[in-house]
Amino acid sequence: MLKGYPVRESLSPAMHNANFRSLGMNAVYTPYEVRQEKLGRVIPALEVLRFRGLNVTMPLKQEVIKYLDELDEIAALCNAVNTVYWHGGKLCGSNTDGVGFVRGLKEQGRYDPTGKHCVIFGAGGAARGVAFALCAAGISSIALWKRKSDDEKLQKLASDLNAYRQGVCKVQSSDEDDIPTLLKENELVINATPLGMEPNVNTVPFDTSLLDSRHMVCDLVYVPHDTRFLREAEARGARIHYGYWMTIWQGVEAFRKWTGKDPDVEVMTKTILEHLTRDDAR
């Protein structure tokens, strides 16, 4: 099950259901649009209805925590949950976004973040998951930039990162004038905002003329997968990394949490790519 609002564009149901069929499992993954104010009514019903687990997406990744019995280390550090599962009779939360991002970055992006300097645009649940996973993977530093609408969220993420690893986040900004310097000082660039997502496909997080061949540019948006941000970054000579790889690998980790089994990663990948290609052809 996938819960959030909106979830209609998500490809997770197709990916997980293809995996279930490949493994011969009697299971189904269905999307449900749930607004924040209704979440407290929905969560208690899950065990009664015999759900094995669910994914949680925006804007519920932090709101869901109050309804859980336990968080694993990653979710506790992130203060954001995207995967809910039962363990020992308790309802538990994890965050597989960051683990999935780093695995895709290393395997498909052929980029090791160890010792690198990173700037993340955004400070929501996805940004938190990615930031802590990068810390665990040995990133040298993380700079944060977010629009002024929510400075408290930005400062909270910076404080939590520095509590986890002292001094890893020295720069937090909401000033557009700081962006050129941030891009000059950091080679790994991550868009963790919804800019570029359907239906606002022509938006970008900053002026992409500031990018060049030194940069590895990642977009966590995956519908559309070939975002304007990534197209313009590639045209500037930057290496790019698509958001769908995080979707695939976080799904792999979520499936393991729900079932204790290994999924058919090849089928999950094929399904995501087929759906993205089909959407591009429309």
Image (cartoon, rainbow, N blue to C red):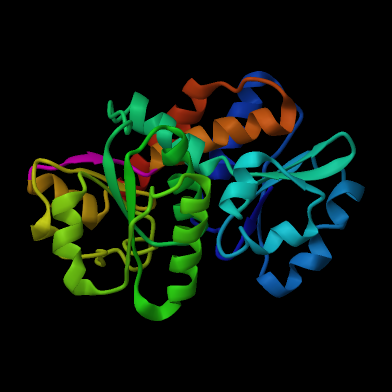
Please tell me which residue is depicted at 71% across the width and 38% down the height of the picture. 28
- Number of dots carrying numbers: 0
Instruction: Answer left or right for 54 relative to 241.
Output: right
Instruction: Answer left or right for 93 relative to 103.
Output: right
Residue 86 painted magenta:
no
> Percent from the top left, x then y, of residue 232?
14, 53
Q: Residue furthest front?
A: 166
> Percent from the top left, x then y, of residue 73?
65, 40
Residue 122 location, quadrant:
bottom left
Question: Can see residue 145?
Answer: yes
Question: Can see residue 82?
Answer: no
The magenta segment:
237-243
> Percent from the top left, x then y, of residue 76?
64, 48
Please tell me which residue is depicted at 24% across the width and 66% down the height of the picture. 202
Q: Residue furthest bottom?
A: 149
Residue 18 location, quadrant:
top right
> Percent from the top left, x then y, of residue 110?
28, 26
Please tell me which residue is depicted at 17% across the width and 43% down the height of the picture. 215
Instruction: Answer left or right for 272 relative to 61.
Output: left
Residue 38 versus residue 188: which sits nearer the camera? Answer: 188
Please tell me which residue is depicted at 53% across the width and 37% down the height of the picture. 250
Residue 6 location, quadrant:
bottom right
